[in-house]
Image: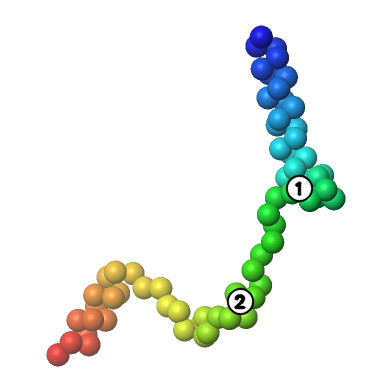
Amino acid sequence: MSRFVIAVLLVLNAATLAWQWDAFARWGFGPHTAREPERLGQQVRPEALTIESPEAVAKRLAAETP
């Protein structure tokens, strides 16, 4: 029984590997590798985004408040 389970697991593992390598792509089966390039075109001023640490935000807010 355990040999059968191991054989099934090996076959499933090989099928998953083949699926990841697009072996089934010609039949319409394959990993979702599509990206969303239209999102990059829709971005509005992505360079304006800044990431600050909580300490830097606290300092900036303390300096801005009178």
How dense is the environment of label 1, judged by Cα within 10 Å: few (below 14), some, or many (20 and up)?
Answer: few
In the rendered image of this protein, does residue 5 appear above or below residue 58? Answer: above
Q: Secondary structure at mark 1?
A: loop
Q: Secondary structure at mark 2?
A: helix
Residue 6, located in which quarter of the rendered image?
A: top right
**Nearer the observer, disc 1 or disc 2?**
1
> Residue, x 23% and y 81% (percent of image)?
61
In the rendered image of this protein, does residue 63 appear above or below residue 26? Answer: below
Residue at label 1?
29
**On-image quarter of the N terminus:** top right
Residue 4, located in which quarter of the rendered image?
A: top right
> Residue, x 18% and y 87% (percent of image)?
65
Tell me the CA gap for discs 1 and 2: 27 Å
The amino acid sitting under disc 1 is Phe
The amino acid sitting under disc 2 is Leu
Q: Which label belongs to residue 21?
A: none
Residue 52 or 27: which is nearer the viewer? Answer: 27
Residue 60, located in which quarter of the rendered image?
A: bottom left
Q: In the figure, is residue 43 to the left or right of 5?
A: left
How dense is the environment of label 2, judged by Cα within 10 Å: few (below 14), some, or many (20 and up)?
Answer: few
**Most extreme residue toward the right, as rendered?**
26
The x, y position of residue 38, in whole percent, is 64, 75
Residue at label 2?
40
The x, y position of residue 54, in whole percent, is 29, 69
